[in-house]
Amino acid sequence: RSHFGSRSSAFVFEVLIDMQRAVFATRQTLGRRALGTSVPRFGGIVAVEGLADLEKAKAGKTSVSYFTASWCPPCKVISPVFTELAASNDSAAFLKIDVDSNEEACAKYEIRSVPTFVFEKDGETLARLQGADQGRLEALVKQHCK
């Protein structure tokens, strides 16, 4: 047991949480400035905050929209794969959409389960993948994101 008591442990924990929040807020701000839009960008992935951001982010490129949820175990498994694919491919827009905060986008794309990946180009759907199938996701990226 620390001679400072349990109060200092709680204080340190609160400081760490505040630091994490500050880092996240800074990353969002820097991402928005780099893109010149309201859409934050992290490691090749655009974090979409609404349907208007989704449409703006995918304009003029092949896009891979990843519909996900923070509470979804398969999403947590496939997320690092999606991040790696986005980092190694600059010919397509890789978009991440949280289903809990983007109901309008989910309705438009008829999302019924997560994870769901939607491949599009010029407004036309090229492919859809439901589930955390790494091999199929990699194959679809290779096929459509040249």
Image: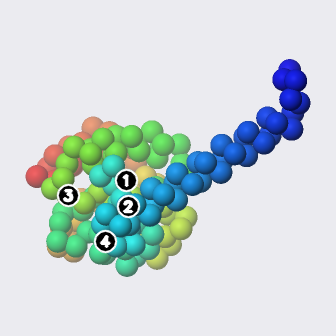
Identify the residue at image location x=39%, y=72%. 38
Between the C-alphas of marks 2 and 4, the distance is: 8 Å
Q: Secondary structure at mark 3?
A: strand
Q: Earlier in the sequence, mark 4 or mark 3?
A: 4
The residue carrying pointer 2 sits among few (fewer than 14), some (14 to 19) or many (20 or more) residues within 10 Å by Cα, namely many
Residue closer to the observer: 146 or 16 = 16
Foreground label between 4 and 3: 4
When asked about the image quadrant of residue 50, the answer is bottom left
Q: Earlier in the sequence, mark 1 or mark 4?
A: 4
Foreground label between 1 and 4: 4
Residue found at the far left of this picture: 146
Contact check, label 2 and label 3, Cβ < 8 Å: no
Residue 142, x across and y down, in percent: 16, 46
Which amino acid does the dot numbered 3 rest on? Ala
Between the C-alphas of marks 1 and 4, the distance is: 14 Å
Foreground label between 2 and 3: 2
The residue carrying pointer 1 sits among few (fewer than 14), some (14 to 19) or many (20 or more) residues within 10 Å by Cα, namely some
Foreground label between 3 and 1: 1
Q: Secondary structure at mark 2?
A: helix
> Which residue has dot 4 on it?
36
Between the C-alphas of marks 4 and 3, the distance is: 18 Å
> Which residue has dot 2 on it?
31
Which amino acid does the dot numbered 2 rest on? Gly
Q: Earlier in the sequence, mark 3 or mark 1?
A: 1
Q: Is residue 57 left or right of residue 11?
A: left
- As drawn, 60 above or below 5: below
Q: Which mark is residue 42?
A: 1
Which amino acid does the dot numbered 1 rest on? Phe
Q: Earlier in the sequence, mark 2 or mark 3?
A: 2
> Which residue has dot 3 on it?
92
For the N terminus, the quadrant is: top right
* Number of numbered labels in the structure image: 4
